[in-house]
Image (cartoon, grey):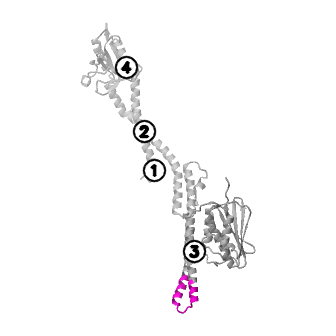
Amino acid sequence: MLKTLYTRLAFWLFLLLASVGLLYSFISFYSLREYTASVNQELHRDLAEKLVQDRNLVDEGRLDEAALKELFELYMTINPSIEIYLLDPSGKILAYSADPAKIKRNHVDLTPVQRLLADMSAYPVLGDDPRSHDRQKVFSATPIPSAANPDGYLYVVLRGEEFDLAEQMARSSRFIEMSAWAVLISLVLGMFAGLAVFRLLTRRLSRLTQLVERFETGDMSQPPHQTWQRQRPRVRDEIDYLGVAFDHMAERIASQIDQLQEKDALRRRLVAQVSHDLRTPLASMQGYVESLRMKRATLSEAEQERFLDIALAEGRRLSRQVDELFELAALEAREKQPRPEPFPLAELVHDVVHKHGPRAADKAIRLTVTASPSLPLAHGDLALTERVLDNLIGNAIDYSPQDSEVSLTLDHQQAFLRVSVRDAGPGIAEQDLPHIFDAFYRGESGNASGHAGLGLAIAKRIMTLQQGSIEVCNLQPRGSAFTIALPIVIDS
């Protein structure tokens, strides 16, 4: 029934207005009674005293009982809305003008009487109603024969039984009818006004709901064509803010879905490449071992040693690729974090060059290092930086022809120390340069070393984690240059 925000608001508005109308009627009813009692007591506060004076109830300092009886009979006829009682000094009822069958009390509490006589402006003051055990009404009272020598009190109930009957009839007919119409008209007008306001508020929420539903049922990989900002360029309230937030969220969702699709495609490609890269050395190793087993009787000892060496080399190649896979996974998952510290980068470069010296000598490749004097300390992880230099120098040796040179240059630019590794190889195809640091990527220059395409991806990740960078460019007329940069240590 109440499935939409608009119908719920309308329902609760109806309940609210009905509650306010009933509360207003209740408060008005009792306020009117209080007001009527106050006015009645204010107008007739001297009534008892005037009755004593006008009707000569006191003669020579004594109460004239015959005049009192005549007063009872007179006012029962001409003004039945009041009831007159004669009280003794203790509040006991001695005589009255009402119907004896309806008198329920024989005693009246004098405390309200004395309070009213002490301060005639303190109204309304309610006293006991002799016709009821618990009801109280406004009254007028005066001591008799005099205030200086009271022998009793004339106690006048201003709203007697006849007044109650008349008021009840009026209240049950005209007053209730008028109140009902007033509440009904107020409720209807309030409902129409509230529904109009709610429609203005929920109209924008309905449009926002339509945008959300359209985006949910559509292609989430594409940002919605109809956006909230196109409909309402200015943000004026919380609904506009919610609409703008939805636009941004939809754009982020579309972008993330697009990234997930790209990553899924990359994952499929990586799985295929990993399978190929691992299958190749495994198949080669398996083939040589099977050949050795089948032809061992016909092979010479030198041929058997050669088969075993090839199988062992392929096994080492497979092991190295698996290690690189685990290393890249650990870096991507941030399980392997760098521990930066100040260290002399020039010394590290010389150590790594010295380590690769024998391998370079086998190909008659010269390794040279050129460093600017007084270089500052670098801030990075020593072991991880050595891992990057090993990869770059190893690749430079692998791709450089015999009797060539691999040069390393260190310099200081702004807040970074830079190391450039230059080789004399075939260079990198221009279309391959943007992807050279992608995992499992191989350029058109081939892969003479059996490189699985992970070394440069690992180097890129290591430099990023160290707040550094790695770049590559081609040299003229041939060769390529890889440059890494590490932040320097800033003296505090």
Labels 4 and 3 touching (C-beta < 8 A)? no
Reading the image, the residue beneath label 2 is: 21
Q: Looking at this view, is 417 or 430 the one in front? A: 417
Relative image position of residue 212 (x, y in whole percent): 52, 58
The residue depicted at 31 percent of the width and 8 percent of the height is 61
Q: Earlier in the sequence, mark 4 or mark 2?
A: 2
Residue drawn at 63 percent across, 67 percent down: 386
Nearer-N-terminus badge (2/1): 1
1 vs 4, front mark: 4
* Mark earlier in primary sequence (1, 4): 1
Left or right of 465: which side holds 142? left
For the view shown, which residue lies furthest in the bottom direction?
298
What is the CA distance from the residue labelled 3 to the residue labelled 1?
68 Å
* Local secondary structure at mark 2: helix
Instruction: Residue 115: give its label.
Output: 4
Along the line of sight, the residue nearer the viewer: 119 or 22: 119
Quick one: label 3 or label 1, which is nearer the N terminus?
1
SS of the residue under disc 4: helix
* The residue stretch that appears in magenta: 283-308
Q: CA distance from mark 1 to mark 4?
A: 57 Å
Name the mark on residue 7: 1
Establish if 244 lies above or below 136: below
| Magenta residue check for 416 | no
Q: Is residue 215 above or below residue 96?
A: below
- Cα distance, mark 4 to mark 2? 37 Å
Q: Do tag 4 and tag 2 residues touch (Cβ < 8 Å)?
A: no
**Mark 3 highlights which residue?**
320
